[in-house]
Image (spheres, rainbow, N blue to C red):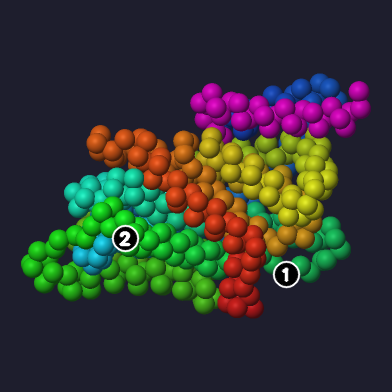
Amino acid sequence: MDPVLIGEILAVLMFLGVIGTLLLGFPVSFSLAGTSLIFALVGWWLGVFDPSNFGALASRYVGFMTNEVLVAVPLFIFMGTVLERSRIAEQLLTTMGRVFGTLRGGLAFSVIAVGALLAASTGVVGATVVTMGLISLPAMLRAGYDPKLACGVICASGTLGQIIPPSTVLIFMGDMLAGINAQVQMSKGNFAPTPVSVGDLFAGAMLPGLLLVLLYALYTLWKAVFDPKSCPALVISADERAALGRDVFTTLLPPLLLIVAVLGSILAGIATPTESASVGAVGAMILAIAKRRFSYAMLRDAAIATATVTSMVFVILLGAAVFSIVFRMMGGDALVHEFLSDLPGGTIGALLVVMLVMFLLGFILDTFEIIFIVIPITAPVLLAMGVDPLWLGVLVGVNLQTSFLTPPFGFSLFYLRGVAPSTVTTGQIYRGAVPFVGLQVVAIALVLSFPALATWLPKVVFG
């Protein structure tokens, strides 16, 4: 049999093998690396893989550890963890609920607004959904909200951390797309390509993120007008109303200033994402101290949580590097290139298929697992076909956010199920998420139809 064909068959079987081992419950990083090593041994035995290819792993690992851009990841995670552990996020949610609560649908509007603010300050989906589920869901149920609407709003708003900067997913994806785009452009003979940075991707994701916030708010407004019983107004006492002005100043303003300082410094070109992440981490601790929520125990818990999440992500990245080398050296990248190039519909057809595959993988894999596996395989082909890297990165972000919401496997639905009271059924959580999945599909269609939604702001901001 042709060695090229044998290698391509092994590459496909390895991809399916990784998915299978993950479904069996094995740890992600070890599934990626272990399955890849097994297929590398098989490929070596069949003469289609040279073990010397693993010599590139050392330099790749050192590159990960010395990459200044990726330093932003633990800093942003620490920033969000401090805001969560110091209960500043809880204060933000409670105060915003009182600001909008007297309106029909007001609590839902407050959840959407706080979801966007927490996304811009934490970038961690699970923590946001759990926090809002613990605080807002009981309040919404006590106010007489339809459980389906309450659950849908919380799950959808919690996933905004996937797309609204400073999303940790966007940091990794921006760094990967920057390297892939440079390689693709040089292969085309362009030895001075326009660089793509994480800051560019942050700017590109802003408008689609705000578009999603707007769509969520419009749906809530529609429910308030045409189904007022599903989202009644909140009754606020005179004492609460009197203290509202002070609470807005002390609770809402400081986190807003922190978010403006972090994102504003990136978009204004004053600081890199890594530098702004350090500002955010220090600013979160200053906020905790100013609000008298700072303690050694809180700092210790935040540091441990940050180290745990960061270690998990980077170990997955190391395992994905092994997978990428074996897949590429056995001819998998050529197979993917041939498959996507031959699809009907040209570039758009190939892009739609990649989006569909990522969406389906979102049912069984975490976001980081998907981007570490799929982006290195498919992005070179798509960029070579003329897809704008910023447009691709934003589409992937919105797409993976949709898979977080889609029943029955959406991760945010599981997060909420874990903290929702027993009176709220799993079916109500699923049915509540469905309209917001539809809104996500609308957002994807808009970004697909109007690439300027992702590419216009980076050009304006960074020229």
Q: Can see residue 337? A: no
Quickly name the residue at label 2. Answer: 224
Residue 194's disc is 1
CA gap, disc 2 and disc 1 = 47 Å
Magenta span main SS = helix
* CB atoms of marks 2 and 1 within 8 Å: no
Residues rendered magenta in the picture: 1-29
Three-letter residue code for mark 1 = Thr
Residue at point 36%, 41% (across, down): 429
The answer to whether residue 2 is visible is yes
Residue type, label 2: Ala
Task: Give the crowd class for mark 1: few <14, some 14-19, many >=20 residues within 10 Å.
Answer: few
Instruction: Say which quarter of the image contains residue 32.
Output: top right
Q: Is residue 234 left or right of residue 460?
A: left
* Name of the residue lying farthest toward the right: 2
| Badge 2 density bin: few <14, some 14–19, many ≥20, Cα 10 Å | many
Q: Give coordinates of residue 288: x percent, y percent.
A: 26, 61
Measured as percent of width and height from the top left, residue 439 is found at 49, 55
Instruction: Report which quarter residue 324 is drawn in.
Output: top right
